[in-house]
Amino acid sequence: MTAILELDALTRLFGGLKAVDNVTTTVNKGELFGLIGPNGAGKTTLFNLISGFTPPTSGDVRFNGESITGMSVHQIARKGMSRTFQNLRVFPNMTVFDNISVGALGMIGVDPFSAIFGGRAKAKEISERSWEMLEKVGLIDHADDLAANLSYGKRKYLEIARALAMQPELLILDEPAAGMNDAETAELARFITGINDDGLTVMLVEHDMTLVMGICERLVVLASGKKIADDVPAKVRQDAAVLEAYLGGDD
Ligand SMILES: Nc1ncnc2c1ncn2[C@@H]1O[C@H](COP(=O)(O)OP(=O)(O)OP(=O)(O)O)[C@@H](O)[C@H]1O
């Protein structure tokens, strides 16, 4: 197995609070990997440390063997890591297509109207890829609609399509099932499994246990910033420390 992402003693303090406390783990290429934990466990902070939105207080993040600690969000995105957000970050007054193509370029820091630094070539590549992704997530008939007019569930897929248009090697999904009903969550599970089967490494932060337990090959569990379990779902489900963390928390 080849590692795509390695976290080495990753720590983030907010004042006196250890939001992420000495977390070490490895995600292998092709894995469908989940990160769970009760409210306030540090999941979002850990994702932010990995994707460059928040610098770590100490520790190292390696992507494909290279340290990316301290790199900008754009630099990390260009290296092949793309993410969605817990709170939808869709531009409501842009069309669905522009949200994907212009949005994807913005995420890797390329000005779509600029010819410098190969921006135009990259813009063309992402524009073509955006049509493919519209098709893939079932939004092709909505290409010219304003994003504001999409249903909540469709906007979630729009965000995923934008992340996929960047042709990532690692896709990080932050609570993609939040606000979805059971049928929508089941459909999402099929979608995520499908893109993983096509070879994409996926990291999932999610509250919906059925989804996480059902599709992830391996889970890391955080509680109060610390890693308390790192195993296959069947083992995690029975882990005493995990049960204690969930029963003791407010989840
Ligand atoms: N920017 C910040 N400044 C100060 N404290 C923060 C900041 N971001 C997160 N925290 C704190 O760090 C801890 C971990 O928060 P985080 O959002 O990472 O947890 P989480 O597991 O994603 O929670 P949830 O499941 O509720 O989204 C919490 O106590 C939170 O209040």
Image (spheres, rainbow, N blue to C red):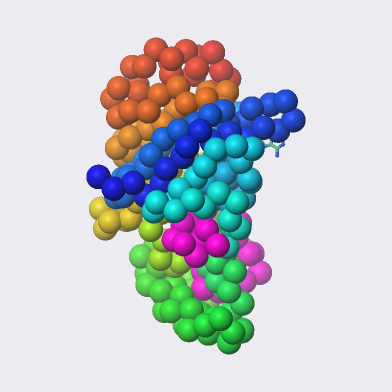
Between 114 and 65, the one nearer to me in the picture:
65
Looking at the rendering, the stretch of residues picked out in magenta corresponds to 75-101
Q: Is residue 160 visible?
A: no
From this view, report whether residue 159 is shown above or below residue 128: above
Q: Check residue 158 for magenta coloring.
A: no
**Toward which corner of the image does residue 33 lie, by quadrant?**
top left
From this view, report whether residue 27 is shown above or below residue 242: below
From this view, report whether residue 117 is shown above or below residue 6: below
For the point 39% across and 53% down, which residue is it? 64
Q: Check residue 78 for magenta coloring.
A: yes
* Number of numbered markers: 0
**Toward which corner of the image does residue 150 lie, by quadrant?**
bottom right
Between 79 and 199, the one nearer to me in the picture:
79
From this view, report whether residue 134 is shown above or below residue 174: below
In-image side of 40 versus 28 (left or right)? right
In-image side of 24 versus 224 (left or right)? left
**Toward which corner of the image does residue 199 lie, by quadrant?**
bottom left
